[in-house]
Amino acid sequence: MNKKNYFIEFNRFIAILIIMGHHLSRVKAVDYHFATGWVYVEFFFLVTGYFTARHLCRYPEENCIDYTLAKFKRLIGIAWLAIVSEYMLELSITFIVDKNRGLPVLLSYLKDLPFEMMMIGSSYKTPSLVPVWYLSALFIVFPLFCLFYQIKNKQLRHTLEVLIPLVYYGYAGIYDNWRFPLNLIRAFSCLLLGAFIFDFGRKIIAVLDRRFSEAGYTTLQLICLTIPVLACWYNTVEYHRVVVLCFMIVMTITAGDRGIKLKHGIFGLLGEITMPIYLFHWVVAMFIGAYLEALGQNLRILIYYSTSILLGIIIVMVKKKIKTHSS
């Protein structure tokens, strides 16, 4: 695949919209679709696992710590801005909306800010800016995953790529595990699924090529894209193992350069704004839930989605301007 695959970027954007649906409770919404949309976090882990495995295959002597720091250096500024915004919002709610919360509660609340800023909050607690659990868990397990993929014994590595996810998903199921220690195990297990696709995807495609035409691959992809959306639309948890399997099938076909291909640059932009939306939509939702509760539910939801997407676009544009001026 090219460095940036527009089909994957588009799916990242769809994933964040559905994850936002999971957080509609923050805008005080009731009886809404996509309440189980958290399962789409698995898609992000899986894609990261795939591309990391591909990178380490090309550069087998990569220093895991240096690679982790370089990868997160691009995200840390936006993450810090989102975390500080969340804490400032919580402070305003403390003193304006919920006046019964005093100074001791405030100081107790602020004690975790340094750990969230260092991206290690997922090592012991639930982050205040809850979406940060994903980045924090990834930051913590990413060097371990890189070391794992550098195991010289390929038979051992391939075996563990299968067994560890099987044990985790068999024991914990496909649930919204973002609390320590299942958050870290979840992250590591799903990264391994991405590595599995990189290691075995081409062999799987070689077998499927005997049975599938290009139209067949496209049809299979469309089916595997539709099932997760419907499962989350109807808030069905019992189908989430199938959802993760669908993510694996879609990614395997895409990695094999089969199936749906998107070429327009707009899909790349949608992928770029995904991370800012992911980090800031929680702040937007908390603000709406605290200060705009009097508005109708549909209007709150509209403001939630439109503001989050607009923020994502603005942040990406500002980043590009800063990069242009600095270079």
Image: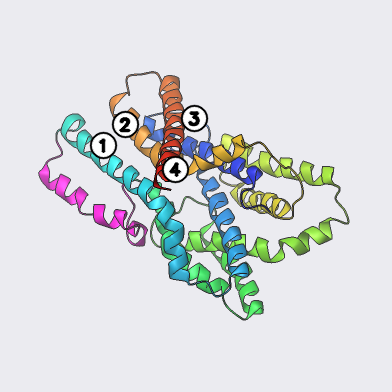
**Residue ID for mark 4:** 324
- Amino acid at circle 2: Phe
Using the image as rendered, state which of residue 104 and residue 235 is in the foreground: 104
* Crowding at mark 1 (Cα within 10 Å: few <14, some 14-19, many 20+): some
**Residue ID for mark 1:** 89
Name the front one of labels 3 and 2.
Answer: 2
Could you give the CA–CA distance between mark 3 and mark 2, rounded to whole angstroms?
A: 19 Å
Going by the picture, which residue comes out furthest to the left? 103
Name the front one of labels 3 and 4.
Answer: 4
Could you give the CA–CA distance between mark 3 and mark 4, rounded to whole angstroms?
A: 42 Å
Q: Is residue 130 shown to the viewer in this render?
A: no
Q: Which mark is residue 287?
A: 2
- Amino acid at circle 3: Tyr
**What's the colour scheme?**
rainbow
Could you give the CA–CA distance between mark 2 and mark 4, rounded to whole angstroms?
A: 32 Å
Going by the picture, which residue comes out furthest to the right? 210
- Labels 2 and 1 touching (C-beta < 8 A): yes
In this picture, residue 280 sits left or right of residue 254: left
Q: Secondary structure at mark 4?
A: helix
Which residue is at a point 40% across and 34% down the rendered structure image?
A: 25
Q: Which mark is residue 32?
A: 3
- Labels 2 and 4 touching (C-beta < 8 A): no
Q: Position of residue 181 (x, y in %)?
A: 40, 62
Task: First in sequence, mark 3 or 2: give its number.
Answer: 3
Task: First in sequence, mark 3 or 4: give its number.
Answer: 3
- Amino acid at circle 1: Leu
State which quadrant residue 1 falls in. Answer: bottom right
Where are the magenta residues, as a range? 100-128
Which residue is at a point 58% across and 55% down the rendered structure image?
A: 46
